[in-house]
Amino acid sequence: MVLDARIPSGPIEKKWDRARFELKLVSPANKRRFNVIIVGTGLAGASAAATLAELGYNVKTFCFQDSPRRAHSIAAQGGINAAKNYRNDGDSIFRLFYDTVKGGDFRSREANVYRLAQVSVEIIDQCVAQGVPFAREYGGLLDNRSFGGAQVSRTFYARGQTGQQLLLGAYQAMARQVEAGKVQVFPRTEMLDLVVVDGRARGVVVRDLVSGEVSSHAGDAVVLATGGYGNAYYLSTNAKGSNVTAAWRAHRRGACFANPCFTQIHPTCIPVTGHYQSKLTLMSESLRNDGRIWVPKTKGDKRPPNEIPEEERDYYLERRYPSFGNLVPRDVASRNAKAVCDEGRGVGPTGLGVYLDFADAIARLGRETIAERYGNLFEMYEKITGEDPYRVPMRIYPAVHYTMGGLWVDYNLMTTIPGLYAIGECNFSDHGANRLGASALMQGLADGYFILPYTIGDYLAQHLGERVTTDHPAFAQVESEVRERYHKLLNASGKRSVDSFHRELGLLLWDHCGMERSQKSLETALAKIPELRQEYHDNVKVLGSAESLNQSLEKAGRVADFFELAELMCIDALERRESCGAHFRIESQTPEGEAKRDDERYSYVAAWQRKEDGDGWTAHKEPLEFEYVQLTQRSYK
Amino acid sequence: MNLTLYVWRQAGPGEPGAMKRYDVPDVSPDMSFLEMLDVLNERLLERGEEPIAFDHDCREGICGSCGMVINGRPHGPQRKTTACQLHMRHFRDGDSIYVEPWRAAAFPVIKDLVVDRSAFDRIIEAGGYISVNAGAAPEANVIPVPKDDAEAAFDAAACIGCGACVAACPNGAAQLFTAAKITHLGLMPQGQAERQRRVVKMVAQMEDEAFGSCTNHRECEAVCPKGIAITTIARMNRDYLKARLFGKG
Ligand SMILES: Cc1cc2nc3c(=O)[nH]c(=O)nc-3n(C[C@H](O)[C@H](O)[C@H](O)COP(=O)(O)OP(=O)(O)OC[C@H]3O[C@@H](n4cnc5c(N)ncnc54)[C@H](O)[C@@H]3O)c2cc1C
Ligand code: FES
């Protein structure tokens, strides 16, 4: 297989224009003859569904929640970037492009990122027109803030609920198309497999989560917008239901999976409190603007924070990175927190935590100002921990947050299976080895509102009138495979719960393929994962039947796929013998202990193809070329 | 802590259900309510009993999936707190806790604590949007929105669609949910063109569903985890009346 990214020729600022001119068009009358299946109704899926329907296509959407409005995108807090330069502070499309490529540690495609920066401005226009209640200034114009260490203010936000408001905008746009008869929504319906006929994506097999019925849907193209796979680690900031099944099943049918080891660990989350912990809660990164991060200087210092005098505290980020201090990028902040905890200087009952202290900020700015800035976050923290951050420093620890890896897509967002597209977090496209704050929302909506609706037409135009229906034997075949997988899980009649396996797998990944990876840790994981997977299939216990609502069975299927993905994550991490962005190989660091890239050997996208016989993977490499951005080693000293 | 739970168990839609008693020892005060149910479910599984079904996803109080009546109150005893954000430190050792699904004609039970809330989606589909196709939007700062209006619109837009308002209402009415969306869009300049059409269509859909009517009990406002104010309902009624009297609806 040759990976062809299909990047248009010409100067970077003209590429998207050129593509839009060269892509084939479907005439208005013909659009209604095409049926598009969209799996996922988060920002990417809902915006794509609404837009394709507005154009005249017939759309079917699927999600596992009881309403499309509940997709995981709803939980995004901080904001969405756009190169509007409303602040007149030197922002531009080129600067957003540059920051994103650099932030991704030079492991993303220049052409894609440039396009993302270009359409970012249209996204804000669209969302405002839909009625998204963005923060405003007194003059009535849109407010911006600086986010995630950016040197310009380009982040648009709606209190701490930006994802919610953007998703409701997209959901409402989609609802309008439901009313118009152009979109059909299937909530509580999980895609369990992809149907490929003559090498092209032709439909999906789904399970109705209420009745348990397995059925097929045929379409002229299939779009996956199913989010990230952070829950492979069990504990993450993702919603409980977030999973890799749709993407993984597509991968098993031939779609390459790119850079699976690029997983982002967010530095400011509430630490784990006990073995029953079911998820981790993100505390917005904006807290680092005013909070100071520290741990005691001496190991095992168990005194309460207020009793530890100033000179016995180690403000380790300020000490090590004098110019960026507490505002170093996510990966750097996370790794440093782990390092001080590994030294035995961590705080809280588990020793896996560091202080985020607002005492100085409160003394300097007053309690009122701090309340104005972070009141709702402080409240949320107190709800969860029972501690008042106005009086006691917060305790935070890094947690799995976002996955940069995902299905490989070309410039047109098509995977290596013709007719199968991937958008939003489930593709690998724009964030390289590390995502910048407020860029995921931008990417999801760029893909859904402004990119896919053009690029999908190019494919459809070439296949007018080539209809396949669910009567094709391929559908019955895939359905029976799906049923068989379920019955195996139900009939394992073992002794251990799905969650107990998922926890064990998650811990294994966290310890061996988490914030730091080494040849040794990865080889250990690669020896253990197949064993644990085997035990899972022999000894998992799932009660109930496949013919009704069965949440244990839903989880069991998802965890089975996480087991396979976990192996590929470790293989990918092992093969990439360099550190870049969130991927830190301890063998590849500078003398000061910072990530060291190896551009000579690893300036590529690793795209993994599963072997036909299911035994292992073939690696493909898409070389990355940088014409507009100069490669530099990141430094935050 | 040691607790005694009484939980509604119902095998499927239309099946008879009943409260079932479970002793739950060793509960940590740091657990969330849903984590406590997770622990109970693991123990049930060990004993060969099917786990209790309940909806949940974000566990951060924002997706609106979780919803259960805890000791007679939707989402439990903490004000402005969803069930997933409720922590066990608000209960006492030895407490008995009663857990039931939303009870409302418009929200039929699917299984145990899981109900069908699709009526909410149908209300939005009837008109809870501003009609603007992708690509047709004007430059964002062309339409200034006074900060206070944007803030007030946001207060209404914060609704998570959980359904607690319906569950708390003695009539099972959906006024607060519907009014929240009407208020959000009606306060924004962008929402004016369709304001009358929207209120008429959404209210008609609401009335077509199995919701009851509002008789000003204000229970909805008291239990709303996002603090949506009942003044939104007054606003919806005004808009509706105006549209009916003077508008084309
Ligand atoms: C706590 C938190 C805060 C964040 N804050 C920010 C922020 O401030 N700014 C920012 O830019 N980004 C932020 N992010 C990241 C961002 O929210 C996500 O990357 C983004 O929302 C993903 O959108 P999506 O549309 O790709 O997928 P999702 O929103 O995850 O949607 C996935 C959809 O797929 C469906 N689905 C999945 N599998 C199946 C299946 N097998 N069958 C059927 N349906 C399926 C789900 O039902 C859902 O509808 C945050 C993330 C988290 C966890
Ligand atoms: S689980 Fe999302 S609001 Fe409770």
Image (cartoon, rainbow, N blue to C red):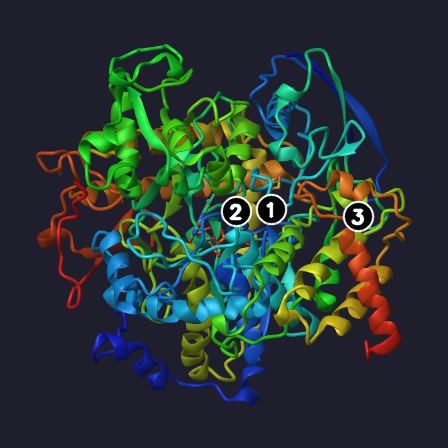
Mark closest to the chain's N terminus, 1 or 3: 1
| Amino acid type, callout 3 | Phe
Q: Is residue B102 left or right of residue B2?
A: right
Task: Tell me how far mark 3 sits from mark 2, CA to CA.
Answer: 25 Å
Task: Give the x, y percent position of residue B63.
Answer: 60, 46
Q: Chain of mark 2?
A: A
Q: Which residue position holds label 3?
A: B107
Q: In the figure, residue A504 lies in which quadrant?
A: top left
Q: Position of residue B176 (x, y in %)?
A: 77, 51
- Residue A364's disc number: none
Within 8 Å: ligand 1 and the Cβ of disc 2? Answer: yes
Q: Which residue is mark 1?
A: B63
Image quadrant in which the C terminus of chain A is located: top left
Q: Which mark is residue A75?
A: 2
Q: Visible in this render: residue A29?
A: yes
Residue closer to the observer: A394 or A277: A394
Q: What chain letter is assigned to the residue under label 3?
A: B
Is A430 left, or right, of A482 in this rendering? Answer: left
Is the residue at mark 1 in contact range of ligand 2, meaning its CB lies under 8 Å from it? yes
Q: Are marks 1 and 3 on the same chain?
A: yes
Within 10 angstroms of label 2, few (less than 14), some, or many (20 or more) residues? many
Mark 3 Cβ and ligand 2 under 8 Å apart = no
- Name the image quarter holding residue A3: bottom left
Badge 3 crowding class, 10 Å Cα cut-off, few under 14, some 14 to 19, many 20 or more, is: many
Q: Residue at x 21, y 78 (%)?
A: A11
Alpha carbon distance from label 1 to label 3: 18 Å
Q: Position of residue A46 (x, y in %)?
A: 55, 63
* Mark in front: 3 vs 2: 2
Dots 2 and 1: beta carbons under 8 Å? yes
Query: Does label 2 lie on the same chain as label 3?
Result: no
SS label for mark 1? loop
